[in-house]
């Protein structure tokens, strides 16, 4: 997944103890498939270390309409991929080739550099999911890349609903996925009713509604919206009039500004310039992928480069 959002990420806003800030997604296309990008947005760049959220689909994969994201580079981030419907094949420069299906989790850590593709291959049918990025902390963001696939994740009851812990700790559940910062990601599948969902007060949180409509603090949140809950809450009350599906995201607010351009998460333009130079010149930094798709070159840097 890619972004061309070059604005620096400001420090988090002051805490909000009640009320939800509704942030509208923007529509984008990734690999030929429609996505709703709820993060980053102008008014909200990050939630904890979560710095990018695409809601993929729902849509139909056919011979004429596929999702094929050709090989492209990443630095300084983790990609977290989770499907509600369908299947995708992940290939990366570590040699991974991994089919992902609903209920399974892919986490790729880019560190100093990795390249990957996401491809439909032979799958045809309904596709829906999310891809999220986590900004890596300074301790690991220049480190070695890695890839994990988790076939099963902790599943918990929340009232009459089900919580699946993708990343981090939630209630009695702990995800096995690699985590370099204090953050959490939970898939909540809820029925009609009222739910009290426990939160960590030292985290800021947001909800991303994928299906149905959720009410909280007298605000409604729908697919295509992020509901920012702020920091300092020990719970959030969610009400559903019918079955709904949402992501709960949270984490300790970032203490430093993150710079995102194309597929790179960094702190400075110089880091991004060097990464893009290394990708463009085909240096060994990003390795090689076995894919039938031609690699993505990416756009030109949006900043003047000294000496060029
Ligand atoms: Mn990617």
Image: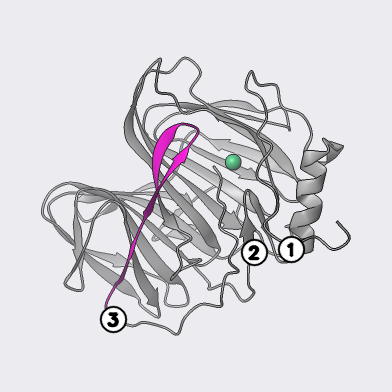
Q: Is residue 152 left or right of residue 224?
A: right
The answer to whether residue 187 is above or below residue 285 is below
Q: Position of residue 198 (x, y in %)?
A: 33, 67
| SS label for mark 3 | loop
Mark nearer the N terminus (3 vs 1): 3
- What whole-number distance in Å separates the C-alpha atoms at marks 3 and 1? 37 Å
- What whole-number distance in Å separates the C-alpha atoms at marks 3 and 2? 29 Å
Q: Position of residue 130 (x, y in %)?
A: 42, 44
| SS label for mark 1 | helix
Crowding at label 3, few (<14), some or many (≥20) Cα neighbours within 10 Å? some
Q: Position of residue 120 (x, y in %)?
A: 48, 23
Q: Is residue 234 left or right of residue 132?
A: left
Instruction: Residue lying at the far right in this picture: please name it.
Output: 307
**Residue 96 in which image quadrant:** top right
Highlighted range, magenta: 18-36
Q: Nearer the viewer, mark 3 or mark 2?
A: 2
Mark nearer the N terminus (2 vs 1): 2
**Residue 197 in which image quadrant:** bottom left
Residue depicted at x 57% and y 26%: 98
Q: Which residue is mark 2?
A: 259
Crowding at label 2, few (<14), some or many (≥20) Cα neighbours within 10 Å? many
Nearer the observer, 303 or 56: 303
Q: Nearer the viewer, mark 3 or mark 1?
A: 1
Residue depicted at x 56% and y 78%: 11
Q: Which residue is mark 3?
A: 18
Q: Is mark 2 within 8 Å of ligand 1?
A: no
Instruction: Determine the main secondary structure of the stretch shown in magenta.
Output: strand
Q: Which residue is mark 1?
A: 269
Nearer the observer, 99 or 24: 24
The answer to whether residue 182 is above or below residue 27 is below
């Amino acid at each position: 997944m890619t972004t061309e959002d070059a604005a620096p990420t400001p420090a988090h806003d002051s805490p909000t103890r009640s009320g939800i800030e509704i942030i509208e997604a923007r529509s984008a296309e990734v690999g030929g498939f429609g996505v709703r990008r709820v993060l980053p947005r102008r008014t909200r760049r990050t939630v904890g270390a979560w710095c990018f959220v695409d809601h993929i689909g729902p849509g139909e994969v056919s011979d004429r309409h596929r999702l094929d994201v050709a090989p492209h580079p990443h630095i300084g981030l983790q990609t977290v991929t989770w499907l509600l419907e369908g299947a995708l094949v992940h290939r990366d420069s570590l040699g991974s080739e991994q089919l992902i299906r609903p209920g399974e989790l892919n986490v790729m850590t880019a560190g100093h550099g990795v390249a990957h593709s996401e491809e439909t291959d032979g799958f045809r049918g309904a596709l829906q999911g999310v891809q999220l990025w986590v900004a890596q902390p300074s301790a690991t963001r220049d480190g070695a890349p890695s890839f994990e696939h988790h076939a099963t994740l902790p599943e918990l009851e929340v009232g009459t609903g089900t919580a699946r812990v993708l990343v981090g700790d939630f209630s009695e559940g702990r995800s096995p996925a690699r985590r370099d910062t204090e953050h959490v990601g939970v898939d909540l599948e809820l029925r009609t009713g009222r739910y009290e969902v426990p939160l960590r007060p030292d985290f800021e949180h947001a909800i991303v509604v994928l299906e149905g409509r959720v009410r909280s603090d007298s605000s409604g949140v729908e697919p295509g919206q992020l509901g920012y809950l702020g920091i300092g809450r020990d719970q959030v009350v969610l009400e559903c009039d019918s079955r709904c599906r949402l992501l709960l995201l949270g984490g300790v607010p970032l203490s430093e500004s993150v710079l995102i351009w194309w597929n790179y998460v960094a702190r400075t333009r110089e880091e991004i310039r060097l990464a893009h130079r290394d990708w463009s010149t085909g240096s060994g930094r990003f390795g090689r992928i076995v894919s039938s798709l031609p690699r993505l070159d990416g756009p030109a840097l949006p900043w003047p480069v000294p000496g060029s």
